[in-house]
Image (cartoon, rainbow, N blue to C red):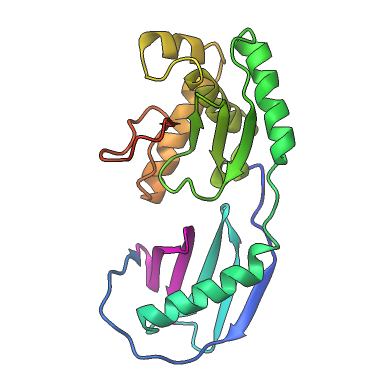
Amino acid sequence: MTPSQPDARPSTRTPARSASGTGRRRAAVPGSPGREVEEMDVDGTSVRIVRSSRRTRTISAAWRDGRVQVSVPMGLSAEAERDWARRMLKKVASRQPTGPDSNGDLLARARKLSRTWLGGEVDPSEVVWSTRQQRRWGSCTPTTGRIRIASEVAGMPGWVLDGVLVHELVHLKHGDHSAAFHAMAERYPRQKEAMAFLNGVSHATGRGLTGPDGEPDSGAPDTGDTDD
């Protein structure tokens, strides 16, 4: 299904410095010899590193699927890759594409969904895009009414975004995934379809993202949040 937001085009290209390779985990891309992809945490921000044997002299960075993708030559050391990722992240951060809504519009959208499908039973205080939702599509803090939506969702169809918003809205009232929770969430007609879409994305990308109906990570600190 075609995302509602195309890949952003701003790209920064910089000559690469050679560096000796060091042992590290690499994930080859099936069907793409000489290409490897790895997710890297850079100062709390997830960056996708793409290594290519065809790339020998340049390093480029651009927004892809809601995150920064840094393309580097094969053979750079882990330290060099991280250094370049940090530098390129700074260069393209100001060019981050906006989602279909700003944070203010996202709050208005969530409140409209609550009125339309949830009888206005929940009223979020704040709804924001987040680049730190590395394992969840959304999370909320029932005690404050604050909802966070993973920036990756901005590139998905609007009805999927609505499904994630409804899921988190219902968590403001129901902290678990009880029958009452599902009954309320499924007042939104495309809720099950949206959840199936997200589960498919998680499986296809192999990123280990927790689907909205998954349980929070074991061992996670108790922050009062309901994360999915």
* Whether residue 161 can be seen here: yes
Q: Quadrant for the N terminus, please.
A: top right
Residue at 49% x, 15% y: name it. Answer: 173
The dominant secondary structure in magenta is: strand
Report how many numbered discs are placed on residues in the image: 0
Q: Residue 8 colored magenta?
A: no
Magenta-colored span? 29-53
Left or right: residue 221 versus residue 42 is: left
Q: Quadrant of residue 221?
A: top left
- Residue 148 lies, in percent from the top left, at 55, 37
- Residue 140 lies, in percent from the top left, at 50, 31
* Whether residue 2 can be seen here: no
Residue at 40% x, 45% y: name it. Answer: 135
Q: Residue 48 colored magenta?
A: yes
- Residue 164 lies, in percent from the top left, at 53, 29
Task: Relative to 63, say whether 13 is above or below.
Answer: below
Residue at 39% x, 64% y: name it. Answer: 38
Left or right: residue 107 versus residue 133 is: right
Q: Quadrant for the C terminus, please.
A: top left
Is residue 186 or residue 4 the one in the foreground?
Answer: 186
- Residue 181 lies, in percent from the top left, at 43, 13
Task: Relative to 4, say whether 37 is above or below.
Answer: below
Residue at 67% x, 58% y: name it. Answer: 96
